Image: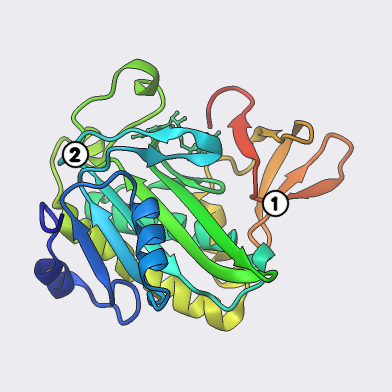
Amino acid sequence: METGIFNERSMKSLLHTKRIGSRLFCLSQVDSTNEELKRRFMADEGLPDGAVAVTSDQTAGKGRRGRGWETPPGVNIAMSVFLRPKLMVDEASMLTLLMALAVSRACSEVTGQKCLIKWPNDVIVDGKKICGILTEMSVRDGGIEYVIVGVGVNVNTPAFDGELFDKATSLMLMTGRSFDLCELAALIMDHFETLYETFLNRRDLGFIRDEYDSLLVSRGKKVRILDPKGDLEGVSLGINDRGELLVELSDGSVRNIYAGEVSVRGVYGYV
Ligand code: ATP
């Protein structure tokens, strides 16, 4: 089903991109924008780098490790970008950091308030999540077939309750006003394209490191790394050029944490 809040013509008029959104699927409702792009790829293996699926009504949004992303219809952005980057498999997780920065830039621009990043995949305001990112990858013959970077942004949600009361916030809760979903989605795509183009040329994150570190919510704080291979505690120092989180342990040694499957917690709270 096409149209809904997002429609192709008005989105294209807002976009300044060449690649991101060159193919655009504006959906009135979908289970998951990540799943939609996988289906589009199954139906057409020529799906271009930069294809985007976007909706304001995602009924079965996904988080990491099988968790859900809950979003009421009509008030928020669920958007995924389909990428075919010429990268090694272990470089793909850097795309998550680029998207987090794109969302942070766009949300800061429209609200006038600093939106921080919880490495690797959340954007945070007032210690709560306004955006979650889920990156999924398909590997064929040892190389990347495609990467899908999915974003959920809480834009005009008026209130959260239950489990999300302490964990989630929205741009509306931040500012007391509502935002145009199409304009914000286009702005995120614009920022992502700028970052993605530079990244493809350089293949590392040195060019965003200072900005990223200045937005890192955990920087200089004690964090606990929840890792299936064993938890770790230390002080978060910032990222390296590969997007790994540098954590100083109590013996003074520094560990590089790879984004893959780990979660970061503040030792005294969620962030
Ligand atoms: P962690 O916090 O462990 O690092 P994560 O940031 O990777 O996890 P995700 O898997 O990306 O979390 O997102 C799923 C989680 O986000 C859910 O378990 C739920 O707690 C929370 N969540 C679900 N919907 C929303 C929402 N609309 N806004 C904010 N948080 C949400």
Note whether residue 107 is visible. Answer: yes
Q: Amino acid at mark 2?
A: Asn
Q: Is residue 265 above or below residue 87?
A: above
Q: Around disc 1, counting alpha carbons within 10 Å, would you say few (fewer than 14), some (14 to 19), or many (20 or more)?
A: some
Residue 108 percent location from the top left of the image: 32, 53
- Quarter that holds the N terminus: bottom left
- Check residue 258 in the rendering and tell me which mark sits there, or answer none: 1
Q: Residue furthest front?
A: 43
Q: Nearer the viewer, residue 93 or 126?
A: 93
Could you tell me which residue is drawn at 10 percent across and 71 percent down?
9
Q: Secondary structure at mark 1?
A: loop
Note whether residue 97 is visible. Answer: no
Residue 45 percent location from the top left of the image: 42, 74
Could you tell me which residue is drawn at 68 percent across and 60 percent down?
240
- Check residue 156 in the rendering and tell me which mark sits there, or answer none: 2
Measured Cα–Cα span from mark 2 to mark 1: 33 Å
Q: Is residue 19 above or below residue 240?
A: below
Cβ atoms under marks 2 and 1 closer than 8 Å: no
Q: Amino acid at mark 1?
A: Tyr
Residue 105 percent location from the top left of the image: 36, 58
Q: Nearer the viewer, residue 9 or 2?
A: 2
Chain-order first, disc 2 or disc 1: 2
